[in-house]
Amino acid sequence: MNPQKENQEEKNRKFNKRIFRYNKRKRYNPEQSKTQEMENADYRKIVLNDQMISVVIPLYNEEQSLMELSLSLKRVFDILKCNYEVIFVDDGSTDKSFETIKEIHRRNGRYHCIKLRRNYGKSAALSAGFKASKGDIIITMDADLQDDPNEIPELIKKINSGYDLVSGWKKIRYDPFIKKQTSKIFNYFTSKVSGVKLHDFNCGLKAYKKEVTGSIKIYGEMHRYIPALAYMNGFKVTEKIVKHHPRKFGVTKFGANRFLNGFFDLLTVAFTNKFMKKPLHLFGFLGVLSFIAGFIITLYLTILKIFYDASISNRPLFLVGILFIIVGFQSFSLGLIAEMITKSSSHDEDVFIETTL
Ligand code: UDP
Ligand code: MG
């Protein structure tokens, strides 16, 4: 045999052996790879014709995660084969986040950046991203690699099956113990107040129809309540279990004050939704209640005084009765003033139209 040919055959044999060992190590299974291919083919049907997807990513000092995140997003969209854009919202980062995004944008024109002048907070960053997004479906995710881009196809699937908002549920989550527990309490109350049965309101990974992002106003720490706000305005909201990862780089951007601020925002959500346009209904009701209680107490004491000649000025109940009456008046007049403010600044109520014919 030709020694050159023999040499080549020996090389091929060695190469095949190496591949075999590699496949064995990776537990390669041709059947499995087939299903992967089929899955990929299925993925192509997930995004409807001419549907565009926008990914909005708020970030604050996340320079180390951005390149990896943009690469894994690209892998997902390469499979989905659809029209898409990725909007990074740089919420006043002081590290090299913006430079990194500039480089990402230079390499791929589908990646954009909105750079805010200072750190406004996640809600404001999301809001700016929503305004700029052109997609029919908007996906939001955190920039710290805790949310998994591979969940995006399933979220889109759910939206296309008729939901307006799909919220991620980090069933198994990789956060500190204290955060997980407080989050449970917070989720319980938000669910009770809003009436929408979700397990995880504050998951960064969510999918929206553009009608939702176009109509819901968020500020402060309100991003936690988007599903609640959407639900209370008549949108169809659901949840989907998603994978969660531990933070790989950097630190969390929310300290202990998240709990107090979050609580105040919950009150705002509950209040503005129910009583924004009719504050007298709340304050008037409380005022009348307090006034009646005060009236009954003082009437009782007056009867004691007149008919039984009892001394009432030294009784604590006397003060309580008077206090109730004063608080009643105060609350009622506060309601009246609030009502006047609402009327004078009144514009058309924000109604959410589903369709018109
Ligand atoms: N973030 C932001 N502005 C802020 C704080 C946070 O844009 O003022 C971003 C942050 O970079 C991340 C996401 O919001 O992409 C979630 O923040 P983080 O991971 O710190 O929250 P956690 O996962 O600890 O709840
Ligand atoms: Mg995080």
Image (cartoon, grey):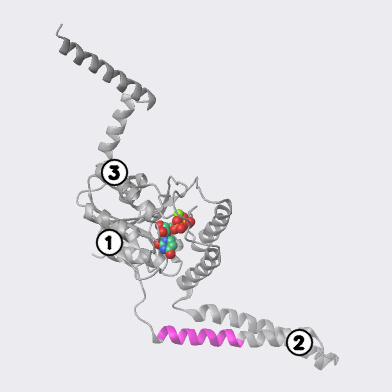
The numbered dot on residue 53 is: none
| Image-quadrant location for residue 324 | bottom right
**Residue type at mark 1?**
Ser
Q: Which tag, 3 or 1, sits closer to the chain's start?
A: 3
Q: Is residue 216 above or below residue 294?
A: above
Viewer-side residue, 80 vs 71: 71
Viewer-side residue, 274 vs 2: 2
Q: Residue furthest front?
A: 3
- Residue 8 position, x and y percent, is 19, 16
Q: Can you identify the residue that label 2 sits on?
A: 318
Residue in view at x 22 percent, y 45 percent: 81
- Residue 306 position, x and y percent, is 81, 93
Q: Separation of disc 3 and disc 1 at Cα?
A: 21 Å
Q: Is residue 90 above or below residue 15?
A: below
| Image-quadrant location for residue 318 | bottom right
Tag 3 and tag 1, C-beta contact below 8 Å: no
Q: Residue furthest left?
A: 2
Q: Is residue 338 magenta?
A: yes
Q: Nearer the viewer, mark 3 or mark 2?
A: 3
Q: Can you identify the residue that label 1 sits on?
A: 133
Which span is picked out in magenta? 329-343
Residue in view at x 44 percent, y 78 percent: 277
Q: Is residue 217 magenta?
A: no
Q: Are there few (<14), some (14-19), or many (20+) residues within 10 Å of tag 1?
A: many
Q: Is residue 303 left or right of residue 10?
A: right
Q: Secondary structure at mark 3?
A: helix
Main SS of residues in magenta: helix
Q: Can you identify the residue that label 3 sits on?
A: 75
Q: Is residue 5 above or below residue 108?
A: above
Q: Separation of disc 3 and disc 2 at Cα?
A: 74 Å
Residue in view at x 28 percent, y 41 percent: 43
Quadrant of the drawing holding the C terminus: bottom left
